[in-house]
Image (tube, grey):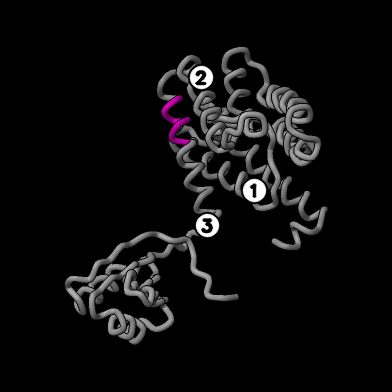
Amino acid sequence: MRTIKTNAWYRLGFITVALAVIAVSINLFFAPHGVAAGGSTGLAIILFEVWRVPVALSTMGINVALLILAYFLVDRATSVRILYGSLMLPVIMAVLPITKVVQDKLLAIVVGSILIAIGFAMLYMVDASSGGTTVPPLILKKHFGIRTENSLFVIDVVVSSLNIIVSGWEAFILAAFSLLITRMVMNYIATGLDRKRMLHVVSDRQLPTIMRVITDTYGAAVTTVLVAGDDAGDGRDVLLVVTDQPEYKDVVRLIHSLDVHALIISAEVADVHAGQ
C-alpha cells in the first residue's frame, strides 16, 4: 500500500480500479433496477427513471457542476484532488453498458452495496474521491462548521427519498438498506474483519491470579494487561483482556470460575498493537 501511495502511476491505477468497481456496482446492480442509493449516481438514476437521461451523462454533469462549486467555495487543492475521480467515473460508466445481471432486486442491491463499499474504501485508502455529492459536505463544513459525515448522510437520505416519488416505497427501502450495508462493509474494511473482544475485569482480590491463569491457559493467544490504581488508593486495579471471538465465552467462564463476583465489561475492538 505504501508503494501505491507514493508512486503516482500506481496510485492512479489503483484509483481507476476503485472507480471501475463503483461503476460496475451502479451499471450492473443499481441502475438496472432503478434504485438510487444516494450520491451523484443516485441522482443520475432518478433522472434516468424520470426523463431517460443516460446515467453516465447526468453523472458527468452533476460532477462537473459540483467541481466548479468546489473550486470557488472550498479550495483549489480539493478540486484537484477530486478532479480525476469526478471525471473518470462517468467515463467508465459510459463505456460499461447498463446490464441486469441479477434478476432478483434484493440480491442485486446487496451485491451492489458490497461492491460500491469496496470501491469507496479503496479510494479512501489513498485519500482519493469520486467527487459528486462529497463536495457539498466540504462546502458546509468550511462555511458553516457542519460535520461532513452528518451532511453527507443527510444528502444520501434525501437522494434515496426521491425513490418514493419516482419508483415507490420498495425502492426507497432498498436504497436505505443499501446505505446501511455500504456503511457496515466500509467500516469492516477500514478496521479489519478479524474483530476481537476486550474485557475490563474488576476483582477485589483475584486479578493477579486471573491474569496468571489466563496466560497459562491461552498463552499468546490472549493479551492481558494489569492496570494498577493510583498510590493514594483512589482507583481500582483493572485487568484488560483481549481475546479472539471464539475464545471469548471460555475466557469469561474461566474468570468467573476464579471469582464469581468479578465485574466484566466487554467491548469489541478492531485490533491490538503491542509495539511494532
Residue 162 marker: 2
Magenta-colored stretch includes residue 2: no
Sequence-wise, the earlier of marks 1 and 2 is: 1
Judging by the rendered image, the residue that carries numbered circle 3 is 191
> Which stretch did the figure color magenta?
172-178
Query: The disc labelled 3 sits on which kind of residue?
Result: Thr
Residue occupying the point 48% across, 22% down:
161
Q: CA distance from mark 1 to mark 2?
A: 27 Å
Disc 1 + disc 3, Cβ < 8 Å: no
Residue occupying the point 61% across, 19% down:
48
Residue occupying the point 41% across, 24% down:
170
The answer to whether residue 34 is seen in the rendering is no
Query: The disc labelled 2 sits on which kind of residue?
Result: Leu
x and y, in percent, of residue 127 in the image: 69, 48
Image position of 54 with respect to 186: above or below: above
| Residue 205 location, quadrant | bottom left
Residue 124 marker: 1
Q: Residues within 10 Å of mark 1 (few under 14, many from 20)?
A: some
Question: Viewer-proximal residue, 65 or 228?
Answer: 228
